[in-house]
Amino acid sequence: MPSATHLPPHLRARYGLGRPPVALLVGVGLVVALLASFLAWTGWVLSNPATTSELLAFRVVSATRVDVTFEVRRSGENPTTCVVRAQDEKHDDVGYATLTITPGRDYVQVTYPLATRSTAVEGELLGCDEGQAPRVDQPDFPPGTVNPAQQPTVDGS
């Protein structure tokens, strides 16, 4: 059986054995390069946020308070909004606070006294963001219960 290169030109054209158009190859290569660049840029942006925060510890002080200790690394030029919460053994929210750290230092370690409506077993930092509220879970208190009053501001200077 003869190879495709030994076929007459009319048979190669009939069965699509000719060279692919150069413009098609260039176009596909350009689309692949753009997609790879976009994915690399997106990965870099997501892995290097402007504000980072980490829970260091929590301590149940009493039936009405949990101390949540966390650190925030930021530019320090703008206020930073953080969200902390406490939950009971049923994973119901018993305390929730959206707090603002005033502009100042670029590294802040905070021990926040989170008021709770009953005894908590867990304290957590949901997130922080500089200049805006972080995208985190909203409070989820059982029906008929309310969040205790919280301290709204922490000094970041």
Image (tube, grey):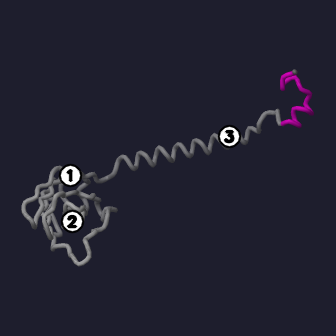
Q: Nearer the viewer, residue 33 or 144?
A: 144
Name the quadrant containing residue 29.
top right
Name the quadrant containing residue 104.
bottom left
Q: Nearer the viewer, mark 3 or mark 1?
A: 1
How far is mark 3 from mark 1, CA to CA?
50 Å
Image side of residue 70 versus residue 138, left or right: left
Above or below, 14 against 122 in this view is above
Q: Nearer the viewer, residue 63 or 10?
A: 63
Image x and y of residue 98, in percent: 23, 67
Disc number for residue 100: 2
Mark 2 closeness class: few <14, some 14–19, many ≥20 residues within 10 Å: many
Labelled pair 2, 3 in contact (Cβ < 8 Å): no
Image x and y of residue 85, in percent: 21, 62
Q: Secondary structure at mark 2?
A: strand
Say which residue appears at 13% left-offset and 61% top-offset: 112
Question: Quick check: is 9 in the magenta stretch?
Answer: yes
Name the quadrant containing residue 121.
bottom left
Residue type pointed to by label 3: Val
Q: Which of the two discs, 2 and 3, labels the residue nearer the N terminus?
A: 3
Residue under label 3 = 26
Mark 3 closeness class: few <14, some 14–19, many ≥20 residues within 10 Å: few
Q: Which residues are magenta?
A: 2-15
Residue under label 1 = 55
Residue type pointed to by label 1: Leu
Question: Quick check: is 146 in the magenta stretch?
Answer: no
Q: Nearer the viewer, mark 2 or mark 1?
A: 1
How far is mark 2 from mark 3, CA to CA?
52 Å
